[in-house]
Image: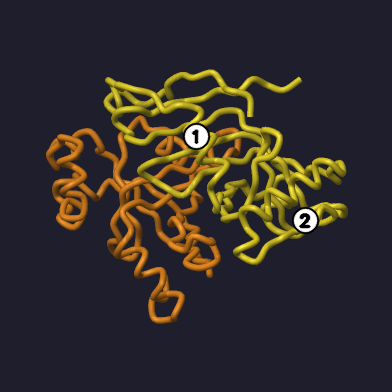
Amino acid sequence: MIDFTSEFGQTVKRHIDEEYFIWLTTVDSNLTPQPRPVWFIWQDDSFLIFSEPKAHKVRHIMEHPNVALHFNTTDKKGEQDVVVILGTAVIDPSVSSVHNVPAYVKKYRKGLVDLKMSPEEMGKRYSVAIRVSPASVRGW
Amino acid sequence: MKPPKVTRPILPKGYVDHPISEVTWEYVEERLTRSVNYWICSTRPNGHPHVIPRWGVVVEGKFYYDGSPETRHAKNILRNPNVTLHLESGSEAVILDGTSEPAGKPSAKLAKRLSQAYKVKYAKEGYSPEPDQWDQGGLYVFTPRQCLAWTKFFENPTKFVFEKEE
């Protein structure tokens, strides 16, 4: 659980509400960290991310469920607005498809148009739901 | 950095089946040199990822960054030198993976160049290390194996592969 009531918690909430991408860092079989920018929404006290089934990150998560999430700093010096979340990722079979998640479709409606993809098409292609539950948050 | 071999990343079918262009290494090198914040991703001894933004400079074709040997990222690379570094944009991404290691005490010439490079970029932010800053350690050098970059993911994802240094 993230405490959104503190000053830093409000910074985290602002990033969650406003950021288009989040960096998901998984660890591969060689224990090399693999950061990738991904689309996300905050839902049920966790980050919901969709992926193609054969994406490397899905395989990494099956082997090493501990992941990190971070946002780009909005401060050009990198001295403010650093938000890093550590958590556990699971493949969530309860999420049927992207197009059944209205908040996700709403957030990425333009992105989907840019990709020339309908929510239904994205749901077929990005059929794996990754859910990251935060264990800790650090930053400044 | 030596110009690397240019290729395409191996992506799952359906990701980018018909790329139409490539990012140039000159573009990537320019961004690497000019960027202010660099995210250093390393792995903790327990296998969990660790990410932290650092300042850094490209000098003599290599990327250097610094920090106390007591910091988590510095301890991590002693156990596992595999590090991934990325710049701050998800839509125009530059992601390099390679290895980081303590650089040791730099030569007088390198120390001077590092000091100058840091001052050019970070003096206005309040960081102006002198050439003897790293005499006792705390300087790290990142050697890339490969780099993934794009300015439009569905058009030009590009992979750069670096030759191993002898």
**Closest to the observer, A82 or B107:** B107
Give SS at disc 2: loop
Q: Three-letter amino acid code at disc 1? A: Val
Give SS at disc 1: helix
Q: Nearer the viewer, mark 2 or mark 1?
A: 1
* First of labels 2, 1 by sequence position: 1
Image disc number at residue A15:
none
Q: Three-letter amino acid code at disc 2? A: Pro
Above or below A123: residue A4: below
**Closest to the observer, B45 or A5:** A5
Mark 2, Cα crowd under 10 Å, few <14 / some 14-19 / many 20+, is some
x, y percent for residue A20? 31, 54
Above or below B8: residue B124: below
Above or below B64: residue A17: below
x, y percent for residue A54? 35, 30
Image disc number at residue B69:
2
Q: How is the image coloured?
A: by chain
Q: Residue at x 40, y 59 (%)?
A: A133
Above or below B30: residue B52: below
x, y percent for residue A87? 47, 57
The answer to whether one can see residue B104 in this image is yes
Question: Chain drawn orange, letter?
Answer: A
> Please, which chain is the residue tagged with disc 1 on?
B
Image disc number at residue B28:
1
| Quadrant in the rendering for residue B103 | top right
x, y percent for residue A44? 29, 64
Spatial separation of the CA atoms under disc 2 and disc 1:
29 Å
A138 horizontally vs B108: left or right: left
Question: Chain drawn yellow, letter?
Answer: B
